[in-house]
């Protein structure tokens, strides 16, 4: 390799990483899937959802924000971390109103796909059934806040990719919400249907009108292969297993 | 097993006035007597599930065809398609691309096949094969499977074929997503088509056999069936422009018990000018009626029997031959025999198989033009002939693409008054003393079942419906009570 690399170990497998990469990026490049929700390859890391939590030299860290360092010992695929991630996903399900059975994102939804990957059938916590609002005012985009998981992808994409700053967070903690930079309606923002802020939504919260259910069941992203299998498919043969 | 008891203590009038205070889907019959202890009226109480109309408010319109399937576990495709037809209106599409309409039709005939097969083989055949009074321990699908194993297998296989068609068109056997506003999301691949064609001959044989069982049974027992739970009524269905039976689309036709047209080829988007719903204090399920005739005379039947009566002809040869034979029974006049539903249902089953064959041979199913778009409209009304009868979906959508109002009239609601009449007739004919016998309970059950009530979508309950029968005297006192579990769906 022309660049200088550092080696780190993930679950006992030694991989080469480029300095400046995050653990998540290095793992992706090596074909090792670390589950994630708020991270997106085109967006700056944010560290909000904690689904990517790994143990670095024994301490929990977000893989999407932690840069690689020489000799790091990373734990990823352990029953302890799996359990931790499962409960995070379960919390997301009960904190919103996620009805996969009729959601147009079903089969293409990253939250649902993670639940399937983790073998979650029903959450162990009580559903909170929060009251959330919808915004259908925009001619090309529909917002259903029932399904927002506060990953902030839209905030970053609008600001950094679209250069518009249409979305932002308001409130704190339990009250935290994604808001838009207009008094009340999405229609009053400069948002366009083709904006990246729309298509990066991992769930069914920001929807492009006119696209619902266009992918037949059987041809949706996660109908046949679990989320992360595209990354795992890139794993060099000698490092498999 | 039936449990009957005579009630010693007088009970209050409240029981009659507010009968459905128990579990949802608790089917209850109240038989009201006159001073001479003769049957004055029978009331079938069903809790109608209306929560959906509220729930869907605010949802984006394109969700409705998928969401609404949750109303019913057994005919979700009918709701899916009726809502999709309403949403075609919302997106301003009056004519779908041929591939889209034919895929939807294929889905619909698949649904008709699986629903009719399930009803006939699973729920009805035990009554027909063992007799209404046979021990309930034998008179069930397990009993049929023991004594007539081939028949039970045929029922399962016919149903499976229908379900596979649903899967190929909607994506899943239940709760698929195929129909979208203005079209469909997939076509039928050549491999899928060839898979269905391979089994078609066998399916035809079984469908013909099923029709023969229903027909022979009806002819052999004509004397006892003709009057069983029967009464004169109007009949309503969609009808094709040329008068052919059309289970997917058409104008509304209503005829009276003698066959006189009440209205014909009515654009169903104007149904509110012709149909209204009456609320009765003792029932949560409404009573639809033809406005011009009023609630007393305007109620009507829907479903297979009504469709056979309204149609001028069927456009597939085998079902048409069967229809002609069926109609000779009543000399071409409408058939008002409750138990004739079963025969009519099997004619439709064969018709559906013929339609499936014709569609499978149609190259349009491999077309790629799947969705049309037009000018947005505020109101969408979609009707379809569901397995148990005309199904109405009506939505209003605001400028934000959100549903602001929804009204559904499900098939079972359309048949509400007819089911009451059927129970009343049975009570008149079979109530000998003020006593609820097993024979009476069985007969009430058989009469209700002829209408294939989808109590699960009218009431949102599934499984075994506890059927409870009460006899109430002219003074309002409870005179007897009895009950049993009845298979519903
Ligand atoms: S993906 Fe790392 S915190 Fe969300």
Image (tube, rainbow, N blue to C red):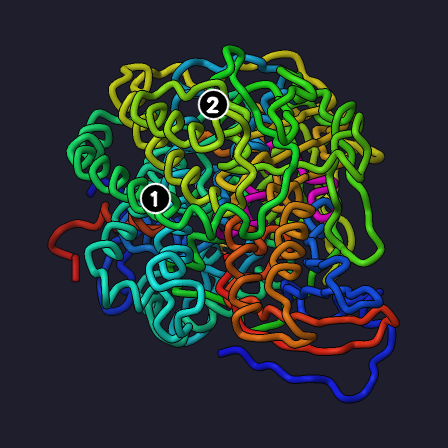
Is residue A207 something that shows in the picture? no
Residue at x 63%, y 25% (from the top left corner): B255
Which of the 4 quarters of the picture holds residue A194?
A: top right
| Vertical relation: A143 (above or below) B122 | above
State the image coordinates of residue B169 (x, y, percent, origin top left).
37, 33
Q: Which residue is mark 1?
A: B163
State the image coordinates of residue B220 (x, y, percent, origin top left).
35, 48
Residue closest to the eye, B213 or B113? B213
Query: Which residue ends up furthest to the left in the rendered image?
Result: A238
Is residue A176 something that shows in the picture? yes
Residue at x 49%, y 37% (from the top left corner): B304
Does A142 sit left or right of B138 as displayed? right
| Vertical relation: B72 (above or below) B268 | below
**Is B343 colored magenta in this rendering?**
no
Q: Which residue is mark 2?
A: B245
Mark-to-mark CA distance, 2 and 1: 23 Å
Residue closest to the eye, B408 or A42? B408
* Region of the chain picked out in magenta, as a range: B54-74
**Is B71 colored magenta in this rendering?**
yes
State the image coordinates of residue B382 (x, y, percent, origin top left).
61, 27
Q: Characterize the local packing of mark 1: few (<14), some (14-19) or many (20 or more) Cα atoms within 10 angstroms.
A: many
Residue at x 49%, y 24% (from the top left corner): B332
Q: Report in which chain the residue with disc 1 lies.
A: B
Residue closest to the eye, B24 or A227? B24
| Count of marks, rendered view | 2
Q: Nearer the viewer, mark 2 or mark 1?
A: 2
Query: Which residue ends up furthest to the bottom in the rendered image?
Result: B8
| Vertical relation: B185 (above or below) B424 | above
Regarding mark 2 in the picture, which secondary structure is present there? loop
């Amino acid at each position: 390799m022309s660049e200088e690399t550092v080696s780190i170990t993930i679950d006992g497998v030694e991989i080469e990483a480029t300095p400046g990469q995050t653990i998540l990026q290095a793992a992706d490049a090596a074909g090792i899937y670390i589950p994630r929700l708020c991270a997106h390859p085109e967006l700056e890391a944010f560290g909000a959802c904690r689904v990517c939590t790994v143990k670095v030299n024994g301490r929990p860290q977000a893989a999407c924000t932690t840069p690689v360092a020489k000799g790091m010992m990373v734990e990823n695929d352990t029953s302890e971390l799996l359990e931790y991630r499962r409960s995070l996903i379960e919390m997301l399900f009960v904190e919103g109103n996620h009805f996969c059975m009729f959601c147009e994102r079903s089969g293409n939804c990253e939250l649902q796909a993670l639940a399937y990957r983790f073998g979650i059938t029903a959450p162990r916590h009580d559903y909170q059934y929060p009251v959330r609002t919808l915004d259908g005012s925009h001619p090309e985009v529909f917002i259903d806040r029932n399904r927002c998981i506060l990953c902030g992808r839209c905030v970053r994409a609008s600001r950094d990719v679209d250069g518009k700053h249409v979305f932002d967070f308001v409130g704190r903690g339990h009250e935290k919400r994604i808001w838009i930079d207009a008094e009340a309606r999405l229609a009053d923002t400069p948002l366009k249907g083709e904006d990246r802020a729309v298509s990066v939504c991992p769930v069914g919260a920001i929807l492009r009108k006119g696209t619902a259910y266009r992918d037949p069941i059987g041809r949706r992203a996660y109908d046949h292969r679990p989320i992360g299998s595209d990354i795992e498919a890139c794993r060099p043969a000698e490092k498999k297993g | 097993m039936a449990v009957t008891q005579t009630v010693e203590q007088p009970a209050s009038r409240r029981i009659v006035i507010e009968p459905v205070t128990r579990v949802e889907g608790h089917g209850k019959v109240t038989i009201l007597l006159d001073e001479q202890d003769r049957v004055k009226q029978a009331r079938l109480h069903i809790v109608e599930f209306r929560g959906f109309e509220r729930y869907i408010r605010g949802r984006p319109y394109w969700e409705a065809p998928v969401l609404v399937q949750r109303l019913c576990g057994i005919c979700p495709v009918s709701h899916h398609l009726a809502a999709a037809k309403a949403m075609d209106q919302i997106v301003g599409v009056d004519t779908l691309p041929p591939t889209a309409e034919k895929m939807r039709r294929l889905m619909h005939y698949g649904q008709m096949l699986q629903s009719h097969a399930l009803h006939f083989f699973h729920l009805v055949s035990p009554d027909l094969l063992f007799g209404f009074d046979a021990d309930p321990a034998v008179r069930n699908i397990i009993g049929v499977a023991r004594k007539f194993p081939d028949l039970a297998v045929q029922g399962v296989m016919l149903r499976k074929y229908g379900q596979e068609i649903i899967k190929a068109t909607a994506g899943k056997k239940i709760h698929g997503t195929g129909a979208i506003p203005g079209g469909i999301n997939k076509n039928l691949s050549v491999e899928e088509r060839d898979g269905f064609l391979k089994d078609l001959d066998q399916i035809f044989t079984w469908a013909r056999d099923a029709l023969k069982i229903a027909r022979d049974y009806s002819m052999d027992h004509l004397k006892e069936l003709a009057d069983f739970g029967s009464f004169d009524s109007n009949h309503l269905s969609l009808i094709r422009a040329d008068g052919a039976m059309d289970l997917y689309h058409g104008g509304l036709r209503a005829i009276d018990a003698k066959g006189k047209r009440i209205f014909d080829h009515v654009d169903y988007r104007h149904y509110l000018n012709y149909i209204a719903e009456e609320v009765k204090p003792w029932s949560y399920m409404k009573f639809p009626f033809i406005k011009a005739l009023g609630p007393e005379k305007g109620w009507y039947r829907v479903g297979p029997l009504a469709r056979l009566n309204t149609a001028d002809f069927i456009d597939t040869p085998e079902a048409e031959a069967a229809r002609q034979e069926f109609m000779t029974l009543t000399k071409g006049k409408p058939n008002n025999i409750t138990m004739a539903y079963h025969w009519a249902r099997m004619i439709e089953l064969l018709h559906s198989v013929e339609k499936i064959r014709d569609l499978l041979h149609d190259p349009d199913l491999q077309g790629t033009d799947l969705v049309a778009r037009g000018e947005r409209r505020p109101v969408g009304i979609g009707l379809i002939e569901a397995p148990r009868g005309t199904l109405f979906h009506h939505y209003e959508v605001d400028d934000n693409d959100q549903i602001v109002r929804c009204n559904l009239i499900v098939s079972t609601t359309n048949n509400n008054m007819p089911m009451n009449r059927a129970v009343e007739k049975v009570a008149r004919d079979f109530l000998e003393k003020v006593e609820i016998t097993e024979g009476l309970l069985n007969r009430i059950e058989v009469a209700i079942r002829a209408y294939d009530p989808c109590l699960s979508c009218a009431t949102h309950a599934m499984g075994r419906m506890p059927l409870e029968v009460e006899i109430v005297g002219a003074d309002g006192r409870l005179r007897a009570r009895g009950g049993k579990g009845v298979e519903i769906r």
